[in-house]
Image (spheres, helix red, strand yellow):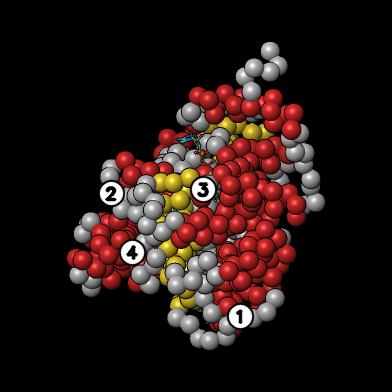
Amino acid sequence: MATVAAAPVRGDVKDLSLAAAGRKRVEWAERDMPVLRAIRQRFEREKPLAGMRMSACLHITAETANLARTLKAGGAELVLCASNPLSTQDDVAACLMKEFGIAVYAIKGEDEHSYYRHIAAALAHRPHVTMDDGADLVSAMIFIALDRLDDVHNEVRKWAATLSSSDRKELVGNVVASMEETTTGVIRLRAMEKDGVLKLPVIAVNDAQTKHFFDNRYGTGQSTIDGVIRATDALLAGRQLVVCGYGWCGKGVALRARGMGAHVIVTEINPIRALEAAMDGFQVKPMAQAAPLGDLFITVTGDIHVIRAEHFAAMKDGAMICNSGHFNVELALDDLAKLATTINRGVREFVDEYVLKDGRRLYVLGEGRLINLAAAHGHPASVMDMSFAAQALATEWSVQNKGKLEHKVHQVPKEVDEFVASLKLQTMGIAIDTLTAEQTKYLASWEMGT
Ligand SMILES: NC(=O)c1ccc[n+]([C@@H]2O[C@H](COP(=O)([O-])OP(=O)(O)OC[C@H]3O[C@@H](n4cnc5c(N)ncnc54)[C@H](O)[C@@H]3O)[C@@H](O)[C@H]2O)c1
């Protein structure tokens, strides 16, 4: 892998001297990202993103670094900031700045002020294309365009207050399109569309089949279990695990946990998903009934306060609780703090102990933030290869369609999905059948085969 740039760039990372270690991580991930590598090689030749300023708010990991290299190879002038204060790999951030000349604003464990100061820095780049993992950049731009500065964090407000009213509108008006990486972000963006405030086209990369079928299910499934084990060293075999939510992520977590010998209970609010869980062989119960049974609870719903006071109050001594769904909102930790007489922070890295009045101890992992990113390294590169190939190609497609896309949430074109899947199969050495002429005719006909 050749160094692309050594020029000093703007940014805010922990320590640039970590760059060499970060480079090893980026190279290791790249070995498992052949689809993205093929796209980068083409982007280097064709420069489809030339002249585009891009701001991306993503987990700053080795896999993201390979996406960033691809976008830069395509000609984009890129700024990265973190989409989660705990998921940044500081050595990767340093490598991106020092070795690849990409501006990065992200430090692992940054406080709320730094987190939003970094988002403001990404907005100040005045992007033509944005990329989000949870819609933070788009939400901030929309509030700014609506002059609703009271609704943004103080650090973003301070920067936005320096803009004229027309500049605030232009910030969002300049955006050709925004890519959204995750389920929750797409939900927020659809809500904006419904309320008529979505002032830019959004591409729901999360909804691409090559993304959520694989990333949410196999990526979150494996890396969540990995995060729990790294944080606790717990044996899953024989333990009672409660998975809240049986969507794509929940299916993956439940499947992997069962594979390691855990007894899994699923909680749901959707009757179809609950039925699916039951027919997949899991116990399904309401949270009130699951709470006293679980040794380990994992939320993956995208919803708020899924585990709250009445559930914590019913849990057994030693129960462990974590979230791998949305940000840090799925566990009502304020409720738990009120129930606790003592909170012992950091009894082990990523573990806080809450002691209740009767002496029961409950353990919260990763402060209720995404455990697969806080305690482990996020999704394996092989699965991010597909998600980020879809991101890169959706970005190219939206730039090709500049000015033609309506201000709504768009799906990734089917051809992009099929291209990514075909290339991935090819790199895995898997060939599939193609339709014969007779079969093509048969499947298109209503007259044959009766
Ligand atoms: N940790 C990660 O790296 C990672 C990766 C991908 C997605 N995510 C996040 O995980 C969350 C879930 O994603 P998904 O793709 O599985 O979404 P999904 O919509 O497919 O599934 C969510 C499920 O949770 C259920 N649910 C909602 N509220 C509930 C409640 N109160 N109790 C029980 N179940 C409830 C829904 O009915 C749905 O079946 C999202 O917030 C997404 O952004 C995290």
Which mark lies nearer to you, 4 or 1?
Answer: 4
Q: Of 98 and 228, which appears nearest the observer?
A: 98
Q: Secondary structure at mark 2?
A: loop
Q: Disc 2 marks which residue?
A: 197
Which label number is shown at residue 174?
A: 4
Q: Of 154 and 441, which appears nearest the observer?
A: 441
Query: How many C-alpha atoms fall within 10 Å of the one at disc 3: few (<14), some, or many (≥20)?
Result: many
* Label whose residue precedes the other's in the sequence (3 or 4): 4
Q: Disc 1 marks which residue?
A: 4
* Label whose residue precedes the other's in the sequence (2 or 4): 4
For residue 197, side relative to residue 395 (left or right): left
Q: Disc 3 marks which residue?
A: 412
Q: Position of residue 47 (x, y in %)?
A: 55, 70
Q: Name which residue lies at 70% across and 76% down.
A: 1
- Whether label 3 lies within 8 Å of ligand 1 gets the answer no
Query: How many C-alpha atoms fall within 10 Å of the one at disc 4: few (<14), some, or many (≥20)?
Result: few
Quadrant containing the C terminus is: top right
Q: Name which residue lies at 39% across and 51% down.
A: 405
